[in-house]
Image (tube, rainbow, N blue to C red):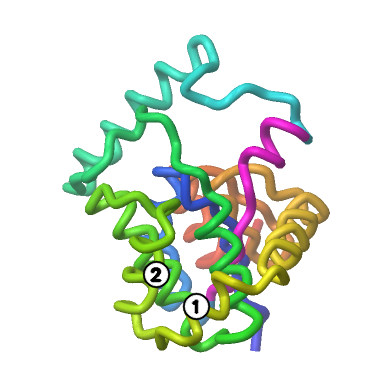
Amino acid sequence: MKPPIEFWFDFISPFGYLASLRIDALAARHGRTVDWRPLLLGVTVLKVMGLPPVPKTPLKGAYAARQIERYLRRHAITLGRDPGAPPMNPLPAGRLYAWLRVHQPARAKAAAQAIFHAHWAQGLPMDDAAALRGVVMASGVPAEVVDAGLADPEAAALLRAEVDAAIAAGAFGSPFVIADGEPFFRVDNLELLEAWLERVGW
């Protein structure tokens, strides 16, 4: 059995959301599973790499805006939130998900998918505690478990550990996929990832 494919993401990333819609089916076609792991772009990109946010980067920001519109048209996807709008605070959702990965691993991925969908497809503010709580409960996590995760200070430490692990693995963006040690950055490289899996590398 080959190890899971690592899927690194930040809930504030529209490209991370778009990759989340495809990564599990892509992996399943090759008999693989996916380990969903959170990171924080505010740490990996802004602090470690010392780069400004993509929307505020000259030339690159305009390209990214065009790229996402092209991707949405190609895959017939409609977002409920403007990708260029100021990002939400990713900490509440990131911390809760990091906590669920440890304490409720069987329910964690469904919770992450629900958070992504609520924020990017429905435009809901996932940095609002009540909205986050409701969405994660609707994904199948019991209310008492959600409340425990939201209240537990360990959640912050668990997310910090995930970010440290992302940096150690060389993951800096969202989405960032690592398959058998081979890194693939950006949603438009999912096709390259699939070719790599089909040929078992080259």
Instruction: Give the residue type that dot 1 points to.
Output: Asp
Residue corresponding to mark 2: 133
Label 2 neighbourhood size at 10 Å, few (<14), some (14-19), many (20+)? many
Q: Is mark 1 on a helix, strand or loop?
A: helix
Quarter occupied by residue 84: top left
Quarter occupied by residue 63: top left
Q: Give the range drawn in magenta.
A: 34-47
Query: Farthest top residue?
Result: 58
The mark found on residue 101 in the picture is: none
For residue 48, side relative to residue 200 (left or right): right
Q: Observer-nearest residue: 175 or 82?
A: 82
Q: Observer-nearest residue: 38 or 153?
A: 153
Q: Observer-nearest residue: 17 or 185?
A: 17
Per the model, the C-alpha gap separating discs 2 and 1 is 8 Å
Q: Earlier in the sequence, mark 2 or mark 1?
A: 2
For residue 26, side relative to residue 173 (left or right): left
| Residue 98, percent from left and from top | 62, 69
Q: Is mark 2 on a helix, strand or loop?
A: helix
Q: Observer-nearest residue: 155 or 71?
A: 155
Residue depicted at x 25% and y 52%: 121
Residue depicted at x 72% and y 55%: 163
Residue corresponding to mark 1: 147
| Residue 120, percent from left and from top | 31, 49
Magenta stretch encompasses residue 32: no
**Residue 191: in sight, yes or no?**
no
Label 1 neighbourhood size at 10 Å, few (<14), some (14-19), many (20+)? some
User: Mark 2 touching mark 1, by CB under 8 A?
Assistant: yes
Residue depicted at x 79% and y 55%: 164
Q: 140 above or below 74?
A: below
